[in-house]
């Protein structure tokens, strides 16, 4: 569990901006980027946290960006990334499907497409000869912290199935497209044995690409680097991670006979530990053997515990800084839904947590919420999106205004 902020700082932010509030620490993000500098290209999977100001920070540090929708391409452009077929390109669009508006946008801005289906290659070839493409290959196995985040194997909808590589290369050749590189992302959460298997699979794909007479310029290791959410969770050895991929890259270079770029595409690793979600305790109550702490933030903000049974460390801060006796509590949000509980493990088990006797008005801090927090928020129960603040060198900057109910209703009124 990471905590970049002091209690006094968090109280000041809650007082100034209100709760629920997302807070990010720029220094933590910069530090994580530095840890990955051995890779030729670090491409931020912006789905983890797509605020334009976070993307700007990434760009200033030399990080490139991945987009998985038209909206994410437009965010990258708004953050100042330069579109085009650079090597490496600033923006890459990764998807398994493409609608007309998205196709028009990638063609207009010359955004390379990381294709997860052969149909996408045909559609692109018909619209844009010479367009640069990556092939996202499903190697036939995957890994994830939950079944919902496993992106490889026959149950995954992602990527082009490994045995279809030659068919995809044929579509590239006949369609007049240019292969930029081969990409694999098999899920989140790393074990090194698995990683070696992925690297081996990549080298074989490069061999087959060469055999099919198609050249390429880079390989991408995808994302998936884990972070320690709770005590005892492993911290990733980024040098070892790079070492394994670099060895694969060297083998691939021997096969193709020239240098290949090595890309990494992390989301969680770069931002998760930079962020906290702040909520205010609004009520406490007992129900049989359970003590409930009810706060003003729910799964409309942080969906991970409800969706995956994910663990997030939590603290309760008292304004006077006083420590109260610990009490096992169920921490729950304001939504009209029983599953709106942050302390719920897989299978609906309520996990006891020691929160220092929370009472109304205390501040709840939910840790490691910089990734897949705000970007997965919803307006469920007609709750406006929370504000976001970026703290840099001690200065807090509002990077997204709190949405208002009026803004939500306006989409439906006055049609
Ligand atoms: N590249 C591709 C093609 C991806 O699909 C993903 C994540 C990433 C990179 C970044 O993966 P990361 O480094 O963040 O593990 N909402 C889930 C995670 C879903 C990830 C989807 N794809 C969660 O909250 O855990």
Image (cartoon, rainbow, N blue to C red):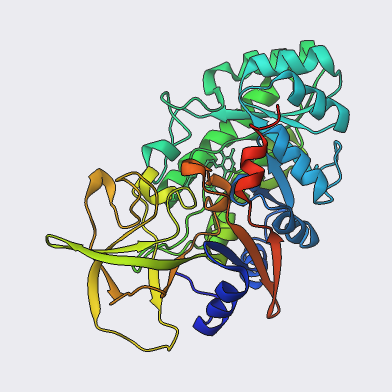
Q: Viewed as shown, does residue 244 lie left or right of 115?
A: left
Q: Is residue 129 above or below residue 414?
A: above
Q: Quadrant of the N terminus?
A: bottom left
Q: Which residue lies at the image location 64% right of the left edge and 70% below the top edge?
A: 31
Of all residues shown, which one is farthest toward the left?
A: 288
Residue 112 image position (x, y, % from top left):
78, 32
One can see residue 26 in this view: no
Q: Which residue lies at the image location 67% right of the left edge and 38% below the top edge?
A: 410
Q: Which residue lies at the image location 36% right of the left edge and 45% below the top edge?
A: 336
Residue 109 image position (x, y, % from top left):
86, 33
Residue 37 image position (x, y, % from top left):
69, 62
Using the rendered view, name the quadrant where residue 172 is placed.
top right
Residue 226 image position (x, y, % from top left):
47, 55
Please name whichever residue, 358 or 31, is drawn nearer the observer in this view of the structure: 358
Labels in figure, total: 0
Please name whichever residue, 213 or 272, is drawn nearer the observer in this view of the structure: 272
Using the rendered view, name the quadrant where residue 261 is placed.
top right
Of all residues shown, which one is farthest toward the front?
A: 414
Q: Viewed as shown, does residue 138 lie left or right of 392?
A: left
Q: Is residue 157 above or below residue 353?
A: above
Please name whichever residue, 204 or 148, is drawn nearer the observer in this view of the structure: 148
């Amino acid at each position: 569990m990471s905590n970049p902020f002091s209690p006094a700082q968090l109280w000041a932010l809650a007082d100034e901006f209100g709760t629920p509030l997302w807070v990010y620490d720029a220094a933590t993000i910069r530090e994580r980027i530095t840890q990955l500098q051995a890779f030729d290209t670090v491409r931020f999977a912006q789905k983890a946290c797509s605020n334009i100001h976070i993307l700007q920070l990434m760009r200033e540090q030399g990080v490139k960006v991945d987009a998985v929708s038209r909206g994410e391409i437009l965010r990258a452009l708004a953050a100042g990334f330069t579109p085009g077929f650079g090597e490496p390109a600033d923006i890459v669009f990764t998807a398994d499907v493409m609608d007309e508006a998205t196709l028009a946008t990638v063609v207009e801005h010359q955004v390379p497409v990381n294709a997860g289906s052969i149909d996408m290659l045909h559609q692109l070839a018909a619209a844009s000869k010479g367009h640069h493409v990556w092939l996202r290959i499903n190697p036939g196995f995957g890994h994830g912290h939950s079944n919902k985040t496993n992106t490889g194997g026959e149950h995954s909808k992602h990527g082009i199935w490994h045995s279809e590589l030659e068919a995809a290369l044929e579509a590239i050749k006949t369609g007049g497209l240019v292969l930029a590189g081969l990409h694999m992302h098999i899920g989140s959460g790393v074990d090194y044995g698995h990683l070696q298997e992925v690297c081996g699979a990549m080298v074989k794909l490069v061999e087959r690409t060469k055999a099919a007479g198609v050249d390429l310029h880079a390989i991408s290791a995808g994302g998936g680097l884990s972070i320690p959410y709770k005590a005892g969770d492993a911290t990733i050895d980024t040098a070892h991670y790079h070492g394994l991929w670099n060895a694969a890259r060297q083998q691939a270079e021997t096969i193709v006979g020239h240098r290949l770029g090595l890309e990494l595409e992390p989301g969680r690793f770069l931002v998760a530990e930079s962020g906290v979600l702040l909520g205010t305790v609004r009520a406490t109550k007992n129900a049989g053997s359970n003590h409930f702490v009810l706060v003003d933030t729910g799964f409309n903000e942080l969906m991970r515990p409800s969706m995956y049974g994910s663990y997030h460390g939590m603290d309760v801060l008292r304004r006077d800084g006083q420590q109260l006796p610990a009490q096992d509590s169920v921490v729950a949000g304001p939504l009209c839904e029983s599953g709106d509980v942050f302390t719920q493990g897989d299978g609906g088990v309520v996990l006891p947590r020691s929160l220092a006797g929370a009472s109304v008005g205390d501040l709840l801090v939910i840790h490691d919420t910089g990734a897949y927090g705000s970007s997965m928020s919803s307006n469920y129960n007609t709750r406006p999106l929370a504000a976001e603040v970026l703290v840099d060198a001690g200065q807090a900057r509002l990077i997204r205004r709190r949405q208002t109910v009026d803004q939500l209703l306006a989409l439906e009124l006055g049609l």
